[in-house]
Image (tube, helix red, strand yellow):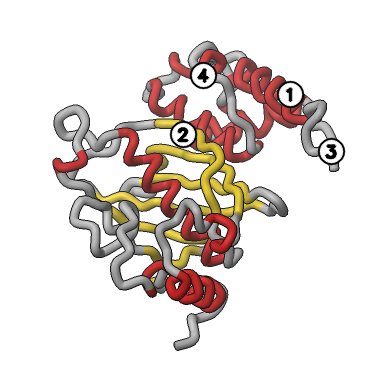
Amino acid sequence: MTTSLNDITTTVTAIAAAEIGIPAAELAADTDLRGVEGVDSVKVLRMIAKIEREYDIELEDEDVFGVSSVSDVATVVEKALSEKAVPMKGLGAK
Amino acid sequence: MSVRVPWSVLPDYRCFGCSPHNDRGLRLTFDTHPDGLCARFTLDRGFESYPGVVHGGLVGVICDETIGNLIVLARRRPAFTVSMRTRFVTPLLVGREYRCVASLRDGDELFHGSADILDADGTVCATVTAVYQPFALDDVRHQLTLGDDEVALLDSAIARHSIDRSPTP
């Protein structure tokens, strides 16, 4: 089963909006998260921690500190999910 | 509800994380939690890194300890940590109370656990994911300083102590 970028964007928007304390409808996909009033790097990290737990993924730190919008976050989540779905050759064969 | 860990049947166990007999340890105690297991803790300046800040390595120790005890209580098998990954969100402060809440995912050969460190408001300060390999006490006798009687005592305690049911006396 794959998760579409649209679904990921919806989930990321909901988590980000909840962390910021605004309705999800007020958060556009291209909004610069760090530019939203009251949002600092800690809040962004907290969003990332919740998103990682939601999808059971571990985002690369370079990606975490490189993202600025919901759309950016959704893209790195999609990448992490696709990498997670690829089986590692030579492991787990019994 | 307070939980007794199986290791407590050994009168002199010295686990850095959870033994009450280790003066230099964390002396963590555990309660059941809807998600698994919870440890409340407040660390003093003996565990300091930057002034007023708890050393970050302790976050890993506390999460590892809570997940590890959840495994033995829920799956009734001790396990060694294979890998662990920590995301630090905010520093923990000396003298403040925090909670570590651990949970487990399904797994057969390896156990996958996660833990969150939360402040008094329930705000996430750090998250950990970790993987554990279960073992039988008899198979690691060369690594543990346990006598035959202690292995039998521990095996019995692990079978009896559970977060699903109260240990039988």
Q: Are marks 3 and 2 on the same chain?
A: no
Residue at (56, 15) in percent of width and height: A63
The amino acid sitting under disc 4 is: Asp
x and y, in percent, of residue B156 in the image: 52, 77
CA distance for labels 4 and 3: 31 Å
Q: Which mark is residue A93?
A: 3
x and y, in percent, of residue B60 in the image: 40, 40
Picture quarter containing residue B31? bottom left
Q: Which mark is residue B83?
A: none
Q: Are marks 2 and 4 on the same chain?
A: no
CA distance for labels 3 and 2: 29 Å
Q: State left or right for residue A33 relative to residue B104.
A: left
Q: Are marks 1 and 3 on the same chain?
A: yes
The amino acid sitting under disc 3 is: Ala
Q: State left or right for residue A51 relative to residue B87.
A: right
Quadrant showing the C terminus of chain B: bottom left
Q: Which mark is residue A61?
A: 4
Local SS, label 1: helix
